[in-house]
Amino acid sequence: MPTDDDVRALLRVEVARFRQRETRRAFDAAVYVGRLGGPRDAFVVRAQDLPAVDAALRTDVVAALLEDAPDDWATAWLARPGLPDLHDDDLRWFAAARTGFGMHDRSLAGFYAVTRYGWLDVRTGERRTWRRLRLRESPAKGPGA
């Protein structure tokens, strides 16, 4: 099981990758199930579909993402626009994740909101933000390495 420091480092990587991938100011949110910094599956929540997205549909989405997922997928996160402050949608998707994981008899190790500016642990309220975030490249290996 990863330590809190490991999880924080993986969340930092997720924020950096999200910044690289999503440069628009307005974009659709996506819910992910998987391993931070590793394999995952996702569902994009299109803005035009938001009126139809209720508690039952959110739970069905999370349960479907877990249907054929490996047993070690124990984390869910919502990648969304805005700041990493607690939003109503964070709580709605957190509730859906708890229920969806429970339907598959799995423990939910963590639920996070990830934005271009940082991350929020929806369960504990811990958060981290960056103005300028850069991932360090691993040093080049020398000859014969």
Image (spheres, helix red, strand yellow):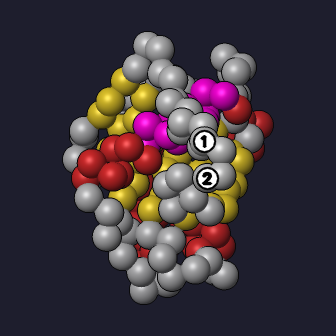
Q: Secondary structure at mark 2?
A: loop
Residue farthest along the front direction in this orientation: 144
Residue farthest along the bottom direction in this orientation: 105
Name which residue lies at 70% across and 21% down: 23
Tell me the quarter of the picture where residue 119 sits: top left
**Residue 113 pos. (x, y %):** 45, 41
Q: Is residue 54 above or below residue 97?
A: above
Amino acid type of disc 2? Answer: Ala
Name which residue lies at 33% across and 52% down: 6
Can residue 16 be seen in the rendering of this structure? yes
Q: How many marks?
A: 2
Q: Main secondary structure of the magenta part?
A: helix
Residue farthest along the top direction in this orientation: 131
Residue that mark 1 sits on: 142
Of residue 35 and residue 45, the one placed in the foreground of this image is: 35
Can residue 96 be seen in the rendering of this structure? no
Name which residue lies at 65% across and 52% down: 144
Q: Residues within 10 Å of mark 2 (few under 14, many from 20)?
A: few
Task: Estimate the spatial distance between the alpha carbons at disc 1 and disc 2, rounded to whole Å.
Answer: 6 Å
Which image quadrant: the N terminus? Answer: bottom left
Q: Which residues are magenta?
A: 11-20
**Residue 35 pos. (x, y %):** 51, 62
Is label 1 in contact with label 2 (beta carbons under 8 Å)? Answer: yes
Of residue 83 and residue 15, the one placed in the foreground of this image is: 15
**Residue 104 pos. (x, y %):** 49, 84
**Residue 25 pos. (x, y %):** 66, 17
Residue that mark 2 sits on: 145
The answer to whether residue 69 is left or right of residue 108 is right
